Image (cartoon, rainbow, N blue to C red):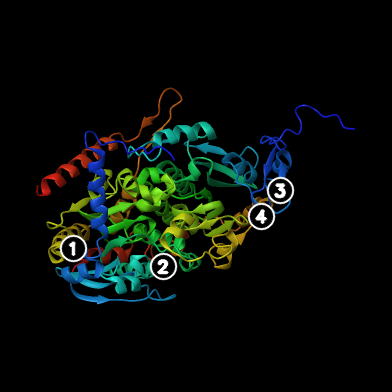
């Protein structure tokens, strides 16, 4: 048995307390009662018309999309769809899309581009479905293609991380001009369970993995992966779905108005730059130590984690 | 009667590691010099051993034609990531054991005289995982190919995104693919060569998107790692699942090419895959790229930009 190394404590935050706080967020993000894409769209938009099918294979129930009007603004919406109870969840494959789900999304992005309608995407998936059916129909290609179409789409894209932002299966719907996240959502390169099974060789270390990956919305904000955190009603979005949807609507409408005025070449260039500049590296020089290109991200994330923790403590009744 | 030497035939040293390698497929013990001479392909069963980045490039490119760019890029620990070991320790150990700074190298070179931008990944460095540095190198190679209008070749050997860089490694998928989208729109060709293994975020981004996708025989190519799949689904995985031939059969690679034929195959492709002439390329936008509308402002653009998008 290897020694358990707990993740480096963030300044003076107690590691156990931090782990519990982060895991609370993971559980909240995965709560089945949390409003999912269709519930949110129906609560915040009018004239909702759902469209179906990828025109190639079948309609994937794990990805929904269509037309809607958000405070009068016409838009195309696309999102992962989980079920609110077991039967529905099985039908929706727990929000894990097959390739046809991403190909449906691509079809809707193209439609939006042709009609010059903005796209609003809702991200809430544990990840793309990893089974044989998914692999043989090319889930990796479908994800890569969806990302490519989004990076160059000549119409505004607003992305909302509403629940679980699980890996490439999430990113395929998340290449927005602006990315918002609900307060209790998470975003990660791999599920905490997956990271634990690979890096710790045991799923028992999922909580440690969740802390190490900095998957909370506040930390993702500090990393610059998301642009804005939308606060949830007290107790979480599942307690007051209607209120959560209204809060999201206000922020989406504001972002859509900002983006609507942009020149479309400038819009696509800005989106390219947004992702082009993600992450830091150093450049080793012939003499001396490597110099970081953009210093200070670690400080920012430390502050964010502390802030997040303080806020949780004040928000929790004694 | 043979003379028994004191250093020969001691248990466990029948095949010293610096001289012999066991084929993981057919278990044959292979003499290293023979293996190297055969391009590190098992002469008995055809198993393709993984290649280090320098061997790979010298195998494909014209002799001494490779000029590496941005060799000094190094990963930094953005998240203060600690699993069983800190990420910084893993980086130091990987640099020491591999002699390279990170899991990819990019530069320019020629294949049968055709100049191209090339980026190759090195599985020996943290499983070839894509962090910010690997993403940056793939992207710079693509941007260079676009600027010079020369073909791009990316050779993948990677388990996927580097978990120790969290979502910032996930963002490398969008960064690299964004650059490839511009390349496709501009009519500059891209060849993706997938070697063992090409999985996870590497396969689900640039590797899957070649104008021509080539795979080495029996290479593991897939989206979900076995441990992730096993944790999510209870299904038995079919035989040959996620191998190069499976991908070929299902239409996601154009050809499975044995190592000794790779250079000639790519040279043959490059006789066709030339960048489109600039005047015709601008605004064709019909590759595998990013939009049906022309990139340079046109009358249609001007008309549409005057229309408010709400209504």
Of the image marks 4 and 3, the number of the one nearer the N terminus: 3
CA distance for labels 3 and 1 = 59 Å
> Hey, which quadrant is residue B301 in on the image?
bottom left
Secondary structure at badge 2 equals loop
Mark 2, mark 1: which one is toward the viewer? 1
Say whether residue A182 is left or right of residue B66: left
CA distance for labels 4 and 1 = 55 Å
Please give the residue where the numbered disc 3 appears in the rendered image: B28
Secondary structure at badge 3 equals loop
Q: Are marks 4 and 3 in contact (CB under 8 Å)?
A: no
Please give the residue where the numbered disc 2 appears in the rendered image: A98
Q: In the orientation shown, which residue stands out farthest toward the left?
A: A318
Q: Are marks 3 and 1 in contact (CB under 8 Å)?
A: no
Please give the residue where the numbered disc 1 appears in the rendered image: A238
Please give the residue where the numbered disc 4 appears in the rendered image: B258
Say whether residue B198 is left or right of residue A114: right
Which chain does the numbered disc 4 sit on? B
**Label 2 and label 3 in one chain:** no
Q: Which mark is residue B8?
A: none
Of the image marks 2 and 1, the number of the one nearer the N terminus: 2
């Amino acid at each position: 048995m290897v020694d358990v190394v707990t993740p480096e404590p963030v300044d003076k935050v107690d590691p156990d307390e931090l782990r519990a706080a982060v895991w609370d967020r993971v559980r909240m993000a995965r709560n089945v009662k949390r409003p999912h894409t269709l519930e949110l769209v129906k609560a915040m938009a009018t004239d909702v018309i759902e469209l179906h099918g990828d025109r190639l294979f079948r309609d994937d129930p794990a990805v929904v999309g269509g037309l809607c009007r958000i405070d009068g603004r016409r838009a195309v919406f696309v999102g992962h769809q989980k079920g609110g109870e077991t039967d529905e969840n099985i039908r929706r494959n727990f929000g894990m899309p097959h390739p046809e789900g991403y190909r449906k999304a691509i079809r809707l992005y193209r439609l939006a581009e042709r009609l010059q309608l903005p796209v609003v995407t809702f991200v809430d998936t544990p990840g793309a479905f990893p089974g044989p059916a998914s692999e043989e129909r090319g889930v990796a290609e479908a994800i890569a293609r969806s990302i490519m179409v989004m990076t160059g789409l000549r119409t505004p894209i607003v992305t909302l991380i509403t629940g679980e932002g699980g890996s490439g299966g999430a990113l395929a719907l998340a290449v927005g001009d602006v990315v918002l996240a609900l307060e209790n959502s998470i975003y990660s390169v791999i599920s905490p369970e997956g990271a634990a099974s690979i890096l710790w060789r045991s799923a028992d270390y999922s909580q440690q993995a969740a802390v190490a990956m900095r998957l909370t919305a506040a930390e993702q904000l500090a990393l610059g992966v998301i642009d804005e955190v939308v606060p949830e009603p007290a107790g979480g979005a599942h307690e007051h779905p209607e209120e959560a949807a209204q809060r999201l609507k206000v922020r989406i409408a504001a972002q859509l108005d900002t983006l609507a005025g942009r020149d479309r070449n400038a819009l696509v260039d800005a989106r390219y730059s947004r992702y082009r500049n993600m992450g830091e590296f150093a450049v080793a020089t012939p003499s001396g130590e490597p110099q970081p290109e953009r210093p200070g991200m670690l400080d920012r994330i430390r502050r964010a984690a502390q802030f997040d923790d303080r806020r949780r403590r004040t928000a929790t009744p004694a | 009667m043979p003379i028994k030497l004191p250093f020969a035939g001691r248990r466990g040293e029948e095949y010293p590691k610096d001289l012999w390698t066991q084929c993981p497929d057919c278990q044959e013990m292979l003499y290293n010099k023979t293996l190297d001479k055969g391009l590190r392909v098992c002469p008995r069963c055809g198993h393709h051993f993984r290649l280090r980045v320098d061997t790979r490039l010298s195998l494909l490119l014209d002799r001494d034609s490779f000029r590496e760019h941005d060799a000094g890029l190094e990963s930094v620990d953005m998240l203060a990531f600690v699993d069983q070991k800190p990420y910084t320790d893993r980086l130091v150990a990987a640099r020491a054991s591999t002699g390279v700074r990170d899991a990819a190298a990019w530069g320019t070179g020629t294949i049968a005289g055709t100049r191209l931008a090339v980026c190759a990944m090195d599985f020996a460095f943290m499983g070839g995982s894509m962090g910010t540095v690997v993403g940056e190198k793939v992207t710079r190679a693509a941007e260079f190919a676009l600027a010079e209008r020369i073909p791009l070749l990316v050779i993948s050997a990677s388990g996927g995104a580097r978990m120790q860089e969290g979502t910032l490694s996930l963002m490398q998928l969008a960064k690299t693919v964004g650059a490839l989208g511009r390349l496709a729109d501009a009519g500059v060709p891209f060849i993706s060569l997938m070697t063992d293994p090409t999985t996870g975020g590497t396969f689900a981004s640039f590797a899957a998107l070649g104008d021509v996708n080539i795979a080495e025989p029996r290479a593991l190519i897939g989206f979900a790692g076995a441990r992730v799949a096993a944790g999510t689904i209870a299904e038995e995985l079919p035989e040959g699942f996620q191998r190069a031939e499976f991908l070929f059969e299902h239409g996601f690679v154009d050809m499975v090419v044995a190592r000794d034929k790779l250079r000639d195959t790519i040279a043959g492709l490059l006789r066709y895959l030339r960048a489109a002439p600039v005047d015709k390329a601008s605004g064709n936008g019909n590759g595998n790229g990013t939009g049906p509308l022309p990139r340079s402002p046109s009358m249609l653009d001007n008309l549409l930009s005057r229309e408010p998008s709400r209504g």
